[in-house]
Amino acid sequence: MTRVSADWQKSSFSAQGSNCLYVAAPAPHTIALRESDEPDVILTTTPATLDAFIRAAKAGAFDGLAQDR
């Protein structure tokens, strides 16, 4: 398991307590994301890829994925 040494910032949209999303920039051109309930599981990506994901989510490209099946 890889440890990411970084200054983690909590999303302002995260609820108090649990279900929080943290974001960090541990290296140039690298964005790291983790959830409060599993802080050792870290997703890394590039700023450009994260930007594309956020734009697609805002446009509704993933609507319905989080619904119970």
Image (cartoon, helix red, strand yellow):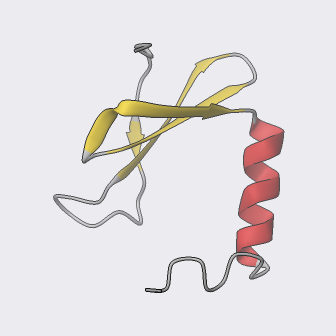
Q: Is residue 51 above or below residue 3?
A: below
The quadrant holding residue 47 is top right
Q: Quadrant of the N terminus?
A: top left
Locate residue 66, reporting x and y percent.
51, 78
Q: Is residue 67 above or below residue 6?
A: below
Query: In front: 22, or 2?
Result: 2
Specify whether 9 is left or right of 15: right
The quadrant holding residue 32 is top right
Which residue is at a point 77% across and 77% down the rendered structure image?
A: 61
Q: Is residue 59 above or below residue 35?
A: below
Q: Is residue 31 above or below residue 57?
A: above
Which residue is at a point 75% across and 57% down the rendered structure image?
A: 53
Specify whether 30 is left or right of 20: right
Which residue is at a point 79% across and 65% down the rendered structure image?
A: 55
Locate residue 54, reporting x and y percent.
72, 61
Locate residue 37, reporting x and y percent.
24, 47
The quadrant holding residue 34 is top left
Which residue is at a point 47% across and 86% down the rendered structure image?
A: 69
Query: In front: 10, or 50?
Result: 50
Query: In front: 42, or 65?
Result: 65
Extreme residue toward the front, this view: 69
The number of callouts visible is 0
Extreme residue toward the left, this view: 17
